[in-house]
Amino acid sequence: MLEYKKITEEHKEQLFALIDRVLSNIPDNHFIPYEQWELDSMFDEENYAPLYGAFDGDKLVGMAQLYVSQDMMAGFKKDFDLQEYSVCELGGNLVLPEYRGMGITTTLQKMELEIARERGFDYIISMAHPENPASCKTLERVGLKFYKTMEVAGGFLRNLYMLKLK
């Protein structure tokens, strides 16, 4: 039985192993690579992103993040005329290949949505590669609405999803 809980620094080795394994087995353009500062900020839930995972016993098998930094959201907020609102982003959704199709990402995203509501965010966004139907369907399943397909920093093509929380 899977257990869903916060990923802490005691899970750091497993977390980075999960990231390495999953990212080395998906098409390059399906996940925007982490920058070093993001990896260094993984456990800063107040200023960067609450981080939750799915555990099979003691084994970390999936993760999701809720990016809460308004500095990170500044460009998005400007582009979509949301400067007066607080915006967060569902992201960092990674699941080991042998655990896919079990609803892990959906469960983790629902948890992160609840955190966004509890923290009082006005909007939540997320992005998925247009050729990744599983990710796109999951975002719709948790309530986000397709907004448009766009190119983001680094030339990555993404479907943008958004939900007004209040």
Image: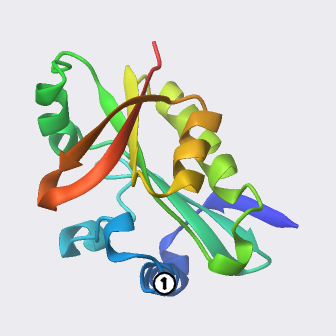
Task: Give the image quarter of residue 81.
Answer: top left
Q: Is residue 31 above or below residue 140?
A: below
Is 147 in front, or is 84? 147
Residue at the limit of the structure toward the front, as seen here: 131
User: Looking at numbered disc 1 in the image, what kind of residue is underneath it?
Assistant: Asn
Which residue is at a point 69% across and 68% down the rendered structure image?
100
Return the x and y of residue 55 as percentages of the image width and height: 71, 71
Q: How is the image coloured?
A: rainbow
Residue at point 81%, 65% (across, down): 2
Q: Is residue 152 left or right of residue 102?
A: left
Q: Position of residue 125 (x, y in %)?
A: 38, 35
The image quarter in which residue 7 lies: bottom right
The image shows residue 90 at horizontal and vertical percentages of 44, 45
Residue at which label 1 appears: 25
Is residue 89 left or right of 36 when viewed as pictured?
right
Q: Quadrant of the N terminus?
A: bottom right
Secondary structure beneath label 1:
loop
Q: What is the x, y in percent for residue 140?
A: 57, 35
Q: Is 17 on the left or on the right of 58, as rendered?
A: left
Q: Can you say whether 146 is above or below 105 in the image? A: above
Of residue 75 and residue 13, the one placed in the foreground of this image is 75
